[in-house]
Structures are given as C-alpha cells and as structure tokens.
Image (spheres, helix red, strand yellow):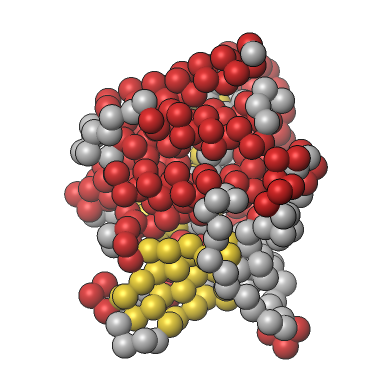
Amino acid sequence: MADAPTRVAILGSTGSIGRQTLEIIAAHPDRLQLVGLAARSRIETLAQQAKAFHPALVAVWDVAKAQALASLLGPRPVLAGTDGLIALATDPRVDVVVVASSGSEALLPVMRAIQAGKRIALASKELLVMAGELIMRLIQEHGTTLLPVDSEHAALFQCLQGVARERVSRLTITGSGGPLWSVPAEAMGAVTRQQVLAHPKWRMGPKITVDSATLMNKGLELIEAQWLFGLEFSRLRAVIHPEAVVHGLVELVDGTILAQMSPCDMRIPIQFALSFPERWATPAPPLEITRLGALRFVEPDLERFPCLGLAMEAARQGGTACVALNGANDTAVHAYLQDQLRFAEIPRVIAQTLEHHHPEPHPTLDDILAVDAWARATAQEFIGSWAAH
C-alpha cells in the first residue's frame, strides 16, 4: 500500500516562493496534497490558485479583503486575519506548513503551528531574525522539525547531515553579491531602481531583491543560521560568490570543507524541505559542471554595503536588536519601493533606529511584537522628517 501524501499548507502562496511551492505540489500529485492557501492581500491571485488546486482551507490576512475573496470563490468559507492564519496552520489535516510570507504577520501562526506539532518548511528569514530563540525552543519542546527553504540554509542543512556540531569549525553562507556587486563605490549613490531590481541570478520579489542589493539579506541569513544550526555568531561568515553555484560551505575542524552546489532554482530547496529525508526527481535543470569555469569567493566590502555591517552588529548585540534591525529595514525598503526614500538612505534609517534602541537580551513574544512596532514607527518618523526637508 502506497504511503499517504504529505498534506501541505502555504502561508504566502501568492509570492515567488509560494508559487514555486505550488509547482512542486503539481509535479508530485501522488506525494503531496495541498490542504491550505493563505496570502496577505493579493486576492485575485489567491482565488486563481484556490480554483486550480481546490484546497480545503483558504485564508487572507487582510480582513477587509476577506469578503471580496469570498465573492470570488463562491459559497465557501474564507478564514481571515491572524486568527484565520492560525486556524489554517494548526488544522489537523495539515502535516507541513510552508512559510513563504516575508512579513511578521506569520510569526504567531507559525508558533501555534509548532505547538500543534506541525513540521515547518521555513522560507521567511524575518521570523528567526525576530524570534529565533522562542521558535527554536518551541521546536524542541514540541518534538517537531524546522526545515530551511532558503537556498543557503538548505545547503548548510544538507552538508551538516551526519556531522556532529563539535566537528564544525565554521559555516559559510554565499551570496551572488546581488545586482550592485560590480557597481563602483563612487557610483552607488546614483543607482537606479532598474539596476536595484535587476538581480543577476535569482527570481525573487521586490523586497527581497532590494535586500540582496544592499546585502542586508546576507546579514539576515547569518542571524537565521545562528539559530538554525545552534552555533555562536563568531563561527559564521558570509562571502560573495558571483557565480552563485555553491550555496553553502561547512568547514570542519580537520580542514575539510563540505560544499553544496546546484542551479539557481528555488524549486530544489523547496522540494527538499517537502521530501526530506527522501530525494525526488526535480523539474529544475541539471547543473553542468564542465561549463562552470572559475568560481570566485570574495570578502564583502562593508563600506560599500553598510547594511551587512549593521546586521552583523545587531547579531552580536542579540535579543531585540535583531527585531529592531528587521523592522527598520522592512520599513526603509518599503519606503524606497514607494519612492519615499533614496537607495543610499536605507542604511541610514536602519542605523538611526538602532541607535535609539536598548536591546532586551531574552525577549518574550510581547517584547518582540512591541519592539517590532516601535522600530517600524521610529523608522517611519525618520523617513517622514527627511522628506519634509
């Protein structure tokens, strides 16, 4: 008798990761079954997905749009708000929750899903940046599993299989350098929106693409790795790897380095998070190593990319410093995408917000939510004051 399919719910189904997760589910109908879809506000796309996949559960975080979604879907209930996302993520029909939302609204639903014993496939950097200590403690207490979907953390996770932590000297996260890696330092202040959003390797949403251009994404990934793999920050580093073929490296105490290589295709780590510990055939193209040529690894320039340095300093401070970092960055990037802020001012907003914050080393959930709200409001005040001048 064949094993029953793994039942999947997706938080953030209308974004890039969510859409590619649906591709994987469609490619393996005998192994994966979609049970729930949730999105923040793109109800037209969410309705199309619901009609194509017929999930038992549909939720929209924006309560005001829930009724509009219900009218698109016909006579079926639509879950709404944080309570709706929690109901979807904790439903007994769900085995795995894919967290593809980039916002903090998924934090409470994910924590409740862990408490309900759900396996978590995590693509959202922000949740571990904000609440890594709480989330990993819950994972341990409730005996469930968190599998990383980010390509870099999925790479490290694979390399660490069967490796005792005491044998690990250092973990290295790689990054392509984003769209601005080759831009001279003197030209960084004049980069255009088109340059910033033209990522050379990955197909991502605008917010993550901006984070890639500032290298904030590497900083967030370092903080995330600290919690995922239980290592102190001094044993983590990020390097620029323009070819984006090697996604993570594990350096062992005897000098051996284990590396994971694959094409720049997020369907590979998404599928691995859903298939683990098995490996299935993938729709992604193979990596032809004879055509790779040279592979370069370069230390990032923190003067050209100050956001990475800000993230590293927040990681060293720990606690709510990382919450403030994430909230300020999210607000600054949103303002940039809304033409309220220049690209070079993004790190300035983050730095000033962090200067006004006094970190709490071991925050509660209430502390995290309060600091997140404070950081966003404080960052917005700085943005508004600069716009007024």
Reply above or below: 292 against 187: below
Q: Is residue 237 left or right of residue 316?
A: right
Which residue is drawn at the image coordinates 52% and 30% (left, top)? Answer: 349
Which residue is drawn at the image coordinates 27% and 25% (left, top)? Answer: 366
Res. 16 visible in picture: no
Reply above or below: 64 against 198: above
Residue 271 image position (x, y, % from top left) = 55, 62
- In front here: 94 or 249? 249
Picture quarter with the N terminus: bottom left
Res. 167 visible in picture: yes
Picture quarter with the C terminus: top right
Which residue is drawn at the image coordinates 21% and 38% (left, top)? Answer: 362
Q: Count numbered badges in the picture.
A: 0
Residue 289 image position (x, y, % from top left) = 68, 84
- In front here: 1 or 219? 219
Reply above or below: 201 against 62: below
Q: Is residue 222 left or right of residue 200?
A: left
| The quadrant where residue 85 appears | top left
Residue 192 image position (x, y, % from top left) = 78, 40
Residue 298 image position (x, y, % from top left) = 57, 69
| The quadrant where residue 69 appears | top right
- In front here: 73 or 237? 237
Which residue is drawn at the image coordinates 36% and 71% (left, top)? Answer: 170
Q: Residue furthest front?
A: 186
